[in-house]
Image (spheres, coloured by chain):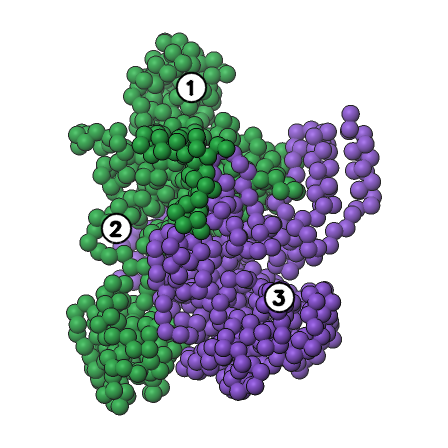
Chain colours: A green, B purple
Amino acid sequence: CVGLAALIDLVHLMFYPPRCDDDDDDASCPIDEEVAKLLELKAQLGGDDGKHQFVLKTAKGTRDYNPKQMAIREKVFNTIIGCFKRHGAETIDTPVFELKETLTGKYGEDSKLIYDLKDQGGELLSLRYDLTVPFARYLAMNKITNIKRYHIAKVYRRDNPAMTRGRYREFYQCDFDIAGQYDAMIPDAECLKIVHEILSELDLGDFRIKVNDRRILDGMFAVCGVPDEKFRTICSTVDKLDKMAWEDVKKEMVNEKGLSEEAADQIGEYVSMQGGRDLAERLLQDPKMSQSKQACAGLSDIKLLFSYLELFQVTDKVVFDLSLARGLDYYTGIIYEAVLTQAGVAPVSNETQQGAPAEESVSVGSVAGGGRYDGLVGMFDPKGRKVPCVGVSIGIERIFSIMEQKAEASAEKVRTTEVQVMVASAQKNLLEERLKLVTELWNAGIKAEVMYKKNPKLLSQLQHCEESGIPLVAILGEQELKDGVVKLRVVATREEVRSIHSAHIMFVLSHTDTQICLDSNETLKVCM
Amino acid sequence: CVGLAALIDLVHLMFYPPRCDDDDDDASCPIDEEVAKLLELKAQLGGDDGKHQFVLKTAKGTRDYNPKQMAIREKVFNTIIGCFKRHGAETIDTPVFELKETLTGKYGEDSKLIYDLKDQGGELLSLRYDLTVPFARYLAMNKITNIKRYHIAKVYRRDNPAMTRGRYREFYQCDFDIAGQYDAMIPDAECLKIVHEILSELDLGDFRIKVNDRRILDGMFAVCGVPDEKFRTICSTVDKLDKMAWEDVKKEMVNEKGLSEEAADQIGEYVSMQGGRDLAERLLQDPKMSQSKQACAGLSDIKLLFSYLELFQVTDKVVFDLSLARGLDYYTGIIYEAVLTQAGVAPVSNETQQGAPAEESVSVGSVAGGGRYDGLVGMFDPKGRKVPCVGVSIGIERIFSIMEQKAEASAEKVRTTEVQVMVASAQKNLLEERLKLVTELWNAGIKAEVMYKKNPKLLSQLQHCEESGIPLVAILGEQELKDGVVKLRVVATREEVRSIHSAHIMFVLSHTDTQICLDSNETLKVCM
């Protein structure tokens, strides 16, 4: 009988709760699992009432969206989808799980974070880890060589969640990609235009879009004397420059990755460079950099890119930044990442110093990123046919967090319904009349509500309007019914209008043939 | 070495492919699995080129949605969500997987169809099987006693797929539910009003909404002499009446379920009854039925329901039908199901006779269903507190299938983008001007496209417009640039307008301060 020992452990745990750092790099925290197991055991040994022994929660790292969060989510999606559609994108959808082998070999070390389904007979399946690999599979499977598509859907990573910072195990990705053989840098520039439009429209504060090219990075590593086999690992160290000081990055290169101090210092000089088209031109003349054909190809493309970005009127926010590396292996050309530069609006992590300098704007995290990946689709094609692709992923979860914080800070209430008018009664026994009127409103396309009570109090009907932000209430009473009219009240101002002859706001009861309209200002008018 | 034997099996399979009936009731087809395993083995042994050894497909029973299908899906969702919002519903979202124990004991025999996740350490998880159980878990967890919400999301069942008939392993559910303690039958009636509105608006052809009540069914079984313990199993046999003749249903009751022939005949009499409020009144007087308190309670509620349905103006489609049973265990009161009654529009299964009588309309499958479930939330509440609920689920996958068929049959092309104007050039070397103009259009909120080529042919630009249904093309040429205007062509009629003084359709180039507007009729005008 293990019961007693386990219970003692449990009691111990209650008094000395273990701590598990949210930022642990392990796929899952062993102590959390122990607690889960013990709680399960406790449940098996019998809870308080023996009937409801389960834990009432969502799975680790996941969350429900309540109506308020959904209202914010809908608003953000509408802005983003509006932008994608303005640029002529189609949309597709793929299943939430793929054959396990479809995902195999695409994510390097991160593969351990993939959720597998249980083998219940039949195919071995895994939950999708991103939307890019399913997109590439879709293109290869359907032999599509040209498409501009967006895809907004949830993806799954058995990562260590840090939910206060918007890091979940189930989260949305919001991808826009252009596949096809086109003239250089035109689709790439459109992706940046899209990021610019979306971040401006969402009004998240100032932002910057960093741009670099994988070929420039590789060329830079080559001319700085990094051995070929260390390109990827040095690249992922450079990728940490947005979170770590150069001194620490250098230490990692030299001490952990075994790079010579000289090579590291040369890299250090390059990765401190930021600029625009001029920087690309300068580096093309750089005696060392210009020795690399790859780097020159990348630098010429950066030049071309900036000329298109000028036509697109977005150069105010775009910076050519040699320190931008981005983690994913599959990028082959241009890469980019957008960061918010205003502290305060974004979720502030514990590490952020309160006294951060105000002049030098502090980067508070990536909200979009992407790049060119010309080889991925070919990995799926039986004949290895390549389909060049460039795309961008909007960091929607971080944007949700910011919008939620803004909504919380603002005095304005977030409405979770769009109801325009509540049909209420002032006296008893008017359910039938209320239902008749609300039916007419629904049939006319008006968003309307009625309380599900035979005799609700007028006060509680009005309270419901105030709580859920319904702007108008149509009040039925004996006198109004006799006169064939309805009293309409503006909830906020308590203005009331009773007659159909009233000038601005009026309402016409069912017994006439008059149509009731509600215009976009929530103003009622009669349309004959 | 198993290679040779397996290869022989494989060759055998190629010449004598096994058949596996889609309608098999087993959770998965063993032969399919064998084939999958052999294909995998073949891949391991080395495919044609040794490099791409995987199968390029989606998981069994799932599908991608292409842009055309997505355009149809979006249209259907907009109609349905519009209706839900008109009725004042909020929306929530829950994770795609739940703790395994959350789903345990909710689905009876169907539990075997639940997808489990692999135990990778930590919690045991399963993919959601429907949206109702997560909804109940959400209410209990957040102690919510009142909500009117909709939830549209995918659910997962390891069922045997019949994809030609719209039966998938991953499919959408589209649920609207009202939770809360209210006066009888008002929310129930609103659910039926919503079904009526949605099916009318989607224009799927004629339909009928069958209504019954679990208490009437139970009362009926009791007065017909069905032993208590056989209520559920007899109920699920009655549920087959929409697919089987009464004779076969009776056989199953008597031969398989061991019911007396007399009891079966009595049930047979009742379940043939259909009507409206009058039928409920007649049955309340029925000497046998009226002996059951439960049945009387149900019949009174049906009467009340119909009085509200009259006020909601939906009685034309609603039928009180004693043969309606519905499978799920958790219903406690009113139940309903909507069926399309026009053959031909719906996916016709193989069994359907070609010469079906035209007068007696043939039911072609359920497109919505639901009912009252007052006990489910209490199963999750630690104190067993009940939250009465009534809801409806729209059978969106079947509706997609029908809409797809309609789109295919219709001459009208389904547009997959909403692009209003294509920016094209008639001469070479005008990329810069095209990008400038399209930027102005985007910045003005106009949906516009440009080809990603430096020097595209005018013909290929026009062809793209025709293929993707873009109504307008703005053509730039040397002369237009000199004059500061743009030539605008209506793609369908080939009408062209060149001057900004033109009456109806015109377009103003960048160098002026004039705003360009596109009204809802895709007509261009200048707004000063």
Look at the numbered discs 1 and 2 and tell me whether their residues touch, using CB distance below 8 Å.
no
Looking at the picture, do discs 1 and 2 lie on one chain?
Answer: yes
Question: For residue A424, what is the image quadrant?
Answer: bottom left
Q: Is residue A385 left or right of residue B385?
A: right
Q: Chain of mark 2?
A: A
Q: Residue flagged by tag 1: what amino acid is it?
A: Ile
Q: Depth check: A113 or A205 in front? A: A113
Q: Is residue A266 above or below residue B354?
A: above
Image point (79%, 38%), residue name: B10
Number of the front mark, 2 or 3: 3
- Residue at image mark 1: A234
Q: Is residue A327 left or right of residue B22?
A: left
Q: Provide residue A69's location: percent of width, then percent of height.
A: 33, 52
Question: For residue A451, what is the image quadrant?
Answer: bottom left
Q: Secondary structure at mark 1?
A: helix
Q: Which mark is residue A407?
A: 2
Q: Is residue A496 left or right of residue A138?
A: left
Q: Residue flagged by tag 3: what amino acid is it?
A: Lys
Q: Quadrant of the C terminus of chain B?
A: bottom left
